[in-house]
Amino acid sequence: MSTADEGLVLVINSGSSSIKYQLLNPESSVVAASGMVERIGEDDGGIEHHADGASTVRRGPIADHTAGLRLIFDMFSSTGRDLRRDGVHAVGHRVVHGGEVFYRPTLIDDAVVRAISELSSLAPLHNPANVAGIESARALLPGVPQVAVFDTAFFHDLPAAARTYAIDAEIAAAHGVRKYGFHGTSHEYVSGQAAVLLGRPPAELNQIVFHLGNGASASALRGGRPIDTSMGLTPLEGLVMGTRSGDLDPGIVPHLVRTAHMDVDQVDVLLNRDSGLKGLSGVNDFRELQRLIDSGDQAARLAYEVYIHRLRRYLGAYLVQLGTVDAIIFTAGVGENSPRVRADALADLSRFGIEVDPAANAANSRVARRISTPDAPVAVLVVPTNEELAIARAARRVAETC
Ligand code: AMP
């Protein structure tokens, strides 16, 4: 049977110097192959490909995204699956910024590619890389439906009070300055899974989602729709992240320009790459941070306390905005794997109906589960995210309409 007949969808997440990919069945969730091309444009590039329980690694320079995608296709054929000959049902592309224009998964044509490209001023690192991935995939798989799934789409209809920044309204309108929100595919997916776990329709639920990975974001959902989220015009706002500062006094930027004589690019690098946990402790990986804390490192301890303090600030804000909360959901690398973060984020909140069960919280598991005490009014859940599956399902849905 061919790859297309099997209903397999190729999901591509094309970043500035990497391409992550998965070939999977959106119905059964079974992954046929996955992998990552790394360090595009550098001398020590490479690809790691996993299929049928085996991993293949190849090292060598990869000039650009087109070469990267070609390498992926070659890897498929050399491991027994020729994507060009057998085809795929659809290709789903993760696209970071959909601006005001895109609010649902969209079938890609030339006009869509142009529009995604034009949104690059809002996501200069991400959208050009997404476009490079899309163009290469269209060239390699002509005739296969290609679908863009936007990280911002889920938050497109945030209420005006939540999405509006209190700056000069004309300047904001002229330059697209509003809260867009990111990680939308993950927030939508895990809140849907949480509803399944609770056996109730999303329309009946008020939920708070914490997506805590290297990037981190929170959202408040009423009846399945977001009413607020922590990331903003860019993925820099909100929670403390691996290398990103999250919320700041905006006055810090002109202060650094004037007193530290930094230019705009240096401030950008400082806030996006050299801040957050890394800026405070020297490490951005949470497991390393925990090891440093356990060894008595004071800077790591402070970084952790700032991280938790910020989480609780958002939790408090969203509890009040929602009024009543049915579920609090933790997801992504840290949210799924750190009982310590979950316990500290929700400590001493039983008067709000929030009570984590220490044994359930400590249990090692890969499946969606409840970690609150059985009688607590607020269900605290750990729900593994799966953005690739959500993108594959969206791509298949859109492909079936063409
Ligand atoms: P993500 O961006 O979702 O892949 O998440 C990456 C983050 O998850 C990194 O900071 C990892 O250190 C963290 N992480 C992964 N596994 C664990 C774990 N077992 N305990 C704590 N943090 C973890």
Image (cartoon, rainbow, N blue to C red):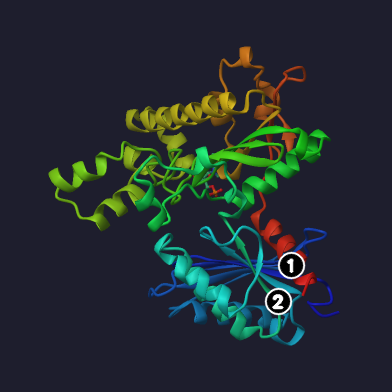
Question: Do residues under tags 2 and 1 come within 8 Å of each other at their CB atoms?
Answer: yes
Q: Where's residue 284, x and y in %? A: 41, 45
User: For mark 2, does the 10 Å Cα neighbourhood hold few (<14), some (14 to 19), or many (20 or more) residues?
Assistant: many
Q: Residue at x 57, y 82 (%)?
A: 70
Disc 2 marks which amino acid?
Pro
Apparent side of residue 101 relative to residue 299 in the rendered image (left or right) = right
Q: Which residue is mark 1?
A: 398
Helix, strand or loop for disc 2: loop
391 or 364: nearer the viewer: 391
Q: Where's residue 224, x and y in %? A: 70, 41
Q: Which residue is mark 2?
A: 145
Q: Residue at x 42, y 59 (%)?
A: 122
In the rendered view, would you say 105 is above or below 200? Answer: below
Helix, strand or loop for disc 1: helix
Disc 1 marks which amino acid?
Val
Apparent side of residue 232 relative to residue 377 in the rendered image (left or right) = left
